[in-house]
Image (tube, grey):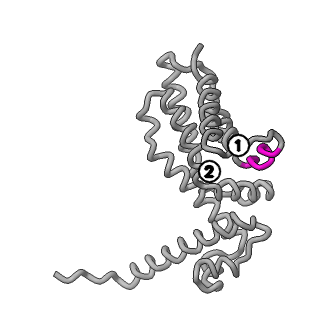
Amino acid sequence: MPKAKAAPEETRTRDADRSQQTILLAARDEFAQYGLAGARVDRVAERAGLNKRLIYYYFSSKDELFLAVLEAAYADIRAAEQQLHLADMPPAQAIRRLTEFTWEYYLAHPEFLTLLNSENLEHGRHLENSTRARKTNLPLIETLAEILERGRREGVFRGGIDAMQLYVSIAGMAYFYLNNKHTLSAIFGRDLMTPKALQERLSHMSDVILGYVLRN
């Protein structure tokens, strides 16, 4: 039986989605390499293999394009976290796995860190009014709060732990190390990016975080 042809409107929607995704991937690489100030829409168009006018059709300015890239970057990491099914794990295992995942994701996606660096140089002005970014990130903190409460009820975790502060500590320990790997390696005279050094760092992070949350 011949396959039914997609309706013209459906085809246009699919093509538009594909074009926007291609633009966002190209823009992500451009912003990660050059930062917001150094990025050029002309180069995004070249990377995407699309006309620059089409980029401005979907994204009215470079700032709007940068925000879309940031929102997509947060959506990607949060979607990957959801695949961990942390709520189904014992509390201590869930906290350890989130710590490991955060470290591993940052290692695998250095562009995520450079995008955050660019937005921090902008004092967060793109994200501050992004309802999408807040909605994307809130479920993680809610899940983490539920895990902490479950651990407290089971007598595994101590009480009074702020979920957002805990996540900032997990992310911060990974972010600072990787974001400053060159200067830290230089001043301490050690290559902090060898496989051994990276494993030592992850073990340290896990021990620190679990040492904080576990009940004595």
Give, as a single range, the part of the protein colored magenta.
179-186
Q: Where is residue 37 in the image (x, y as percent from the top left)?
A: 79, 68
Amino acid type of the residue tagged 2 in the rendering: Arg
Q: Left or right? Give the position of 200 relative to 4.
A: right
Give the percent coordinates (x, y) of residue 193. 67, 46
141 over 71 or under it: above or below: above
The answer to whether 30 appears left or right of 95 in the picture is right
Residue 134, numbered label:
2
Q: What residue type is labelled 1?
A: Leu
Front disc: 2 or 1: 1
**Spot occupied by residue 26 in the image (x, y as percentages of width and height):** 61, 72
**Secondary structure that dominates the magenta span:** helix
Q: Which residue is drawn at 75% across and 59% down?
A: 118
Q: Residue 37 carries which label?
A: none
Q: Is residue 145 above or below residue 176?
A: above
How crowded pointer 2 is (Cα within 10 Å; few <14, some 14-19, many 20+) is rated as some
Q: Which residue is drawn at 48% across and 25% down?
A: 150
Residue annotated with mark 1: 192
- Front one among 89 and 8: 89
